[in-house]
Image (cartoon, grey):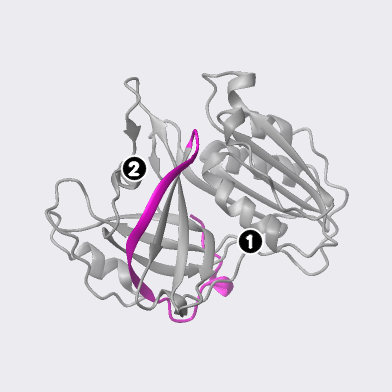
Amino acid sequence: MAKTPRLLPENPRLFRARVLRTERTTPSMHRVTVTGDDLHEFPFLGFDHWFRLFTGRPDQDAFRMPDLDGKKWWPTFLAIPEDVRPHCTNYTVAAFRPMPDGTAEMDIDFVVHTDADGEPEGRAAIWACAARPGDQLAMLDQGCIFDCPDDTSEVVIAAEETGLPGVLGIAASLPRDTVGRIIQEVPTAGDVREIDAPSGVTVTWIVRDEVDHHAVPGRAALAELQRHVPVDDRGYAFVVGESTLATEGRRHLHRAGLPKSRITFSGFWKHEAKESVSA
């Protein structure tokens, strides 16, 4: 996931948490709700607030997570012996709820792709689908990526399912006078959600099963985005998800007249590799 330095917290903080409950919210999305002794102190910003997620692997007998320096966490993480090192990946806050008793709950939504036998693929999704109340995890706060200039004339957002939690958060956080459009691709009609977008933002849902069940995720969203022409050079675009959607989407928007400085793009994963792209 790409980093915008000015949006990163000055002192990224590690939060330890535990699973409260899990549920399959749509055919392709599994939600894990977590809490923690100090999670109420998580500085939730809305939009696409994201974090490094640390979880145990199936071959580990216990979750072991050392304290990390938020700014220099990577060398410390790599120094953990591989047989006890947690799995690390990047996720977006799907929802954050302060509770009446002074605690807080956070929802984390995991995209579930399955193999030919219907079993979840990918270490994070496998962990999420198997998670049980009390399972331990940790999260390193990373702030937001979405960085819309104040003078923006139009907001354009494009993503496939891995970007959906961020898109939902961004739409709900946008000023209510924002104009623009959201292009959101999902695998099935059952994955379509209500989006709390401003009235001036048009939402285009693309259901991959209805276009081409075997299509690479993000290709249909990219095709729709490539038909979009920015209204002027003061627009702002946010294009995330599969690597080709992000890179080709940025290329199209820039060629169509949008300055590179007004395009945020991030390839979360590559179809060929079927794995997360490190930030």
Q: Is residue 277 visible?
A: no
Numbered tag placed on residue 146 in the rendering: 1
Query: Label 2 amino acid?
Result: Cys
Magenta stretch holds residue 275: no
> Quick check: 4 above or below 248?
below
Instruction: Please tell me which residue is depicted at 70% across the width and 35% down the height of the picture.
Output: 205
Span of residues in magenta: 1-28
**Image position of 21 (left or right of 197):** left
**Number of marks in picture:** 2
Give the mark, 2 or 1, whose residue is nearer the N terminus.
2
Q: Are there few (<14), some (14-19), or many (20+) residues within 10 Å of tag 1? A: many
Q: Quadrant of the C terminus?
A: bottom left
The residue labelled by disc 2 is 129
**Image position of 43 (left or right of 273):** right
Instruction: Please tell me which residue is depicted at 62% across the width and 35% down the height of the picture.
Output: 185
Magenta stretch holds residue 22: yes
**Image position of 181 (left or right of 158):** right
Residue 107 location (% of width, % of height): 47, 58
> Quick check: 91 above or below 217?
below
Alpha carbon distance from label 2 to label 1: 29 Å
Q: Are there few (<14), some (14-19), or many (20+) residues within 10 Å of tag 2? A: some
Query: Label 1 amino acid?
Result: Phe
Identify which residue, 173 or 144, lies in the foreground: 173
Identify which residue, 109 or 102, lies in the foreground: 102
